[in-house]
Structure formats: C-alpha cells, structure tokens
Amino acid sequence: MYDITDYGACGDGKTLNTSFIQKALDECGRTGGTVRIPPGTFLTGTIYLRSNTELHLEKGAVLLGSPDLADYNEEDAYEQNWFSKAEGWSARHLILAVEVHDVSLTGEGMIDGNGRAFFTTSPRSPGKICWRDGTCNARDYEHCGRPGQEIVFVESTHIRIRDLRLRDMACWSCYLYGCENVQIRGLAIENGICNLNTDGIDIDSCRNVTVSDCLIRTGDDAIAVRGSPSRLKDKSRICENITIQNCVFFVSADGFRVGVGSGTIRNVVVSNIVIEHAGRGIHLQNCYGNVSPGVNISHVFFSDIVIRDAATPILLGAGSEKSTAQMKNIVFRDIDITSPGSVIVAGAGGTRIENVSFFNVFFQVEAPEKEEEESASCFSSTGVSAEACFRGANYVPFIAENARCILLENFRFRGAPAEKALFLRNVTDLKGAPTSMD
C-alpha cells in the first residue's frame, strides 16, 4: 500500500499535490500494488496511472482538479490526444492511463473535476429538444479554456473503474478510447445540467466492455458508444461487445447515444435502464456533422427501458445526406415511454436503415408545452428535422423514411388520434402498425 501522504501530499484543498501523487503512482508501478488516497481534499493537475496499479480513494477522499490549465498535461503528451476547437475544450486531462494494462480506479471517494472554475454560470439559448434549460460553456471558449476529457484510458487493457463519485467534470467524465476488457460498475456521476460536453461515459472503438449500476446526471449525454478509431495507433479497432445495464440517467442531451466516427459499432446490449429526463432518450446516428461515410451500426439490442420526459424518445437517423454507412439489425423490446415526441427511423443519402424491430412498446403521448407552427412539409430525410416538424397538429407517434424491414409487434400508444398513427415515406416491408388504446 502506497499512501500519497507518505510522499508529501496534503489534503487541505490548497496545496498542489500533482508531483506527490505521481511519485506514489510511479513507485507503485515498479512492483504493482495500490496507491491510497486518504480522507481529505487533494488538489492536483494531471496524473498518470501505471500498469499493475490500483488508485483507491477512501471514503471522504476528494481528488480535486486544479483551476489552472497550466497544471495539466501538454497537448502533445501522447500521440492519440486531441481537442475540440468547435466545442471549446482543450487536450488537457485530469487522470491519464495511456497504453497500460491491469489498472484499477476504485473506492468510495470522489473525483471532482472543478468545472465551476471553467464554466460560465448563466445558461443561454435553451433548445426545443436538447438543453431545454439552456447551455453553459467555457468562460474562455475562444481559446479552449477548460480541460478536455477528465478520466482517460487510451489503448489499454484490463481496466476496472468502480464505486466512485465523479462530480462537476469540465468535459467528458470518463473516456475509453481503443481499450479492451473493461469493467465499470457503481459510478455516481453528477455534473452541471447545463454544462456542455459533460458526458458521463464515452466508449470509443473499444471491445469487451461492461457498464452496470451507474447513476448519471449531466448536461450532455449519459453514455455514448462511438466508432472513431482514426487517432488510434491501431486504426483497425472496432467498437464491439458492449453491455450496459441497471442504470438511471437524468441528462440534457441523449440518454443513450450510438454513433460518431467512420468506423464500426456492433454487438451492443442495453437493458434495465431508466431515463428520467433527456433531450432524446435513445439516439442512433451514422453521421455526426458532415463526416462521410459515417459509422456502420449493427446488432444493437435494447430491452426493459423506461423513458420519461424526453422531447424525442427514440431516434434512429442517418444524420446527414452524405451518409453511406449501414444501420441494421436493431431491436427494441419491452419499452415504456412517456413523451410528446415521436419514435423516428429515418435513413438518408446512401443509408437505408433496415431490420428494425419493436416488440412490446407502450407509448403514453404527452402534449408538448406549446404547439409548434411548422408544417410536416419541412421534414427532410436526416431524422432530426422530423423532431421539429411532427408536433402539435402534425403529430404522429411513429415516423419512418428511407427504411426497409421494420416490424412493429404490440406497439401501443395512448393520447394521439388513431388515424394519425404513422407517417411513412420510401419504406418497404413494414409489418404491423401502432395500435391506439384510447
């Protein structure tokens, strides 16, 4: 056991402890073992985890991110690093594990990203779908004046992350990039509900990942599964064999998101999830922005999902007319929805969504806060436009375009006219239809 206070660390919330913590981690990494963070508030910049080590935060321990970006890693610290000028965050991080193995991050303590030192405090520009409470970004947005992803594992194997509280992160809370054999369990993530890009867990180009028993409240997506291997050393990596279960989400953007990149995502199983509040409950998208051809998505299974207070409950969309990627073999089973929005399946460009099945869906349609003025004629084929167009007098529970082989079995709804159950355009081989219970 390597106690960081034996190396000079002081838990007064003021002393910068980066070098003391890193010395303990480096020494532990030579032989393997556990680095202990005792009760107290330990201010730190970037620290690097080593192979065969566990960083353990005792109950009452707080690892607090420095408010000064100069205390974080250089932006060229590792080859796979990146930042987002468009979103206003840097390539500096709080905890880094790069090309390591057999690493654990555990304990009943807290990792505090100190987002309050970087974000504005007055929300702006509330949206109709996502960020209905408005958005906050970095005070120094123009110069990417906040840390990027806070806890980062890159091209690493055999990772355990358990039982921690993650609070007030300045960007994505936990980012797994090109990793294998990962277990995440029992995290409680609490970020500002208006703070942009503060995703809970992002899983990018990884394989064999399990996530369970997490509570996530944040200003962006709860969990995102991505397929963007272009920055990895091994660019052949596929995002596959991902299971997520027994979680509760309260978010401003997507409860569960699948997409981003130009790689491949497959074999994803999601079950026993409650989405209390979201812009979109479940969102699968081939293209993010104008990226072409987009990410291929297949064999994704959702079961036993409760969706509440989501402007759009489920959206499967190509995302761009430039998309040529595939989206196929998607299954929804035992889904309970209360929402004013529609379930949408919308291909575009070269993407025709296929083999999508809905079994045992109950949909309580809620009236939106105010009816929209748009006409359904504004609907284009990217999916997102349908969210705005099919509201108020135009509302229908189920919308599909540029799709084939769709099955609706025991898809029931209440609160909308039975004669307006479906909107279809360029759809072949549809079996079943929504059934009104009014």
Image (cartoon, rainbow, N blue to C red):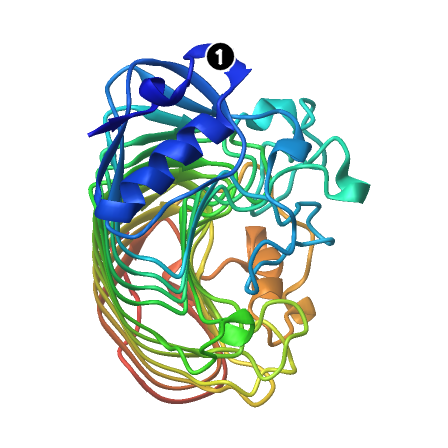
Residue sitting at x 43%, y 19%: 42
Q: Is 415 left, or right, of 118 in this rendering?
A: left
Location of residue 426 in the rendering, given as x and y in whole percent from the top left corner: 51, 88
Q: Is residue 249 visible?
A: no
Say few, some or many: other residues with alpha carbon within 10 Å of mark 1 (under 14 / 14 to 19 / 20 or more): some
Depicted 82 relative to depicted 96: above or below: below
Q: Quadrant of residue 115?
A: top right
Q: Quadrant of residue 243?
A: bottom left
Q: Residue furthest top?
A: 12
Q: Is residue 361 visible?
A: yes
Q: Please state which amino acid type lies under the numbered disc 1.
A: Gly
Q: Quadrant of the N terminus?
A: top left
Instruction: Give the residue number, with chain letter if any, for mark 1.
Output: 13
Per the image, label 1 sits on a secondary structure element best described as: strand
Location of residue 368 in the rendering, given as x and y in whole percent from the top left corner: 52, 42
Depicted 159 relative to depicted 49: above or below: below
Of 313 and 25, the residue lying toward us: 25
Residue sitting at x 51%, y 46%: 253
Residue sitting at x 65%, y 83%: 322
Residue sitting at x 37%, y 41%: 26
Of 370 and 15, the residue lying toward us: 15
Location of residue 131 in the rendering, given as x and y in whole percent from the top left corner: 58, 40
Q: Residue furthest right?
A: 142
Q: Is 429 left, or right, of 320 in this rendering?
A: left
Location of residue 158 in the rendering, given as x and y in whole percent from the top left corner: 23, 58
Of 27 and 94, the residue lying toward us: 27
Depicted 24 relative to depicted 102: above or below: above
Q: Quadrant of residue 147?
A: top right
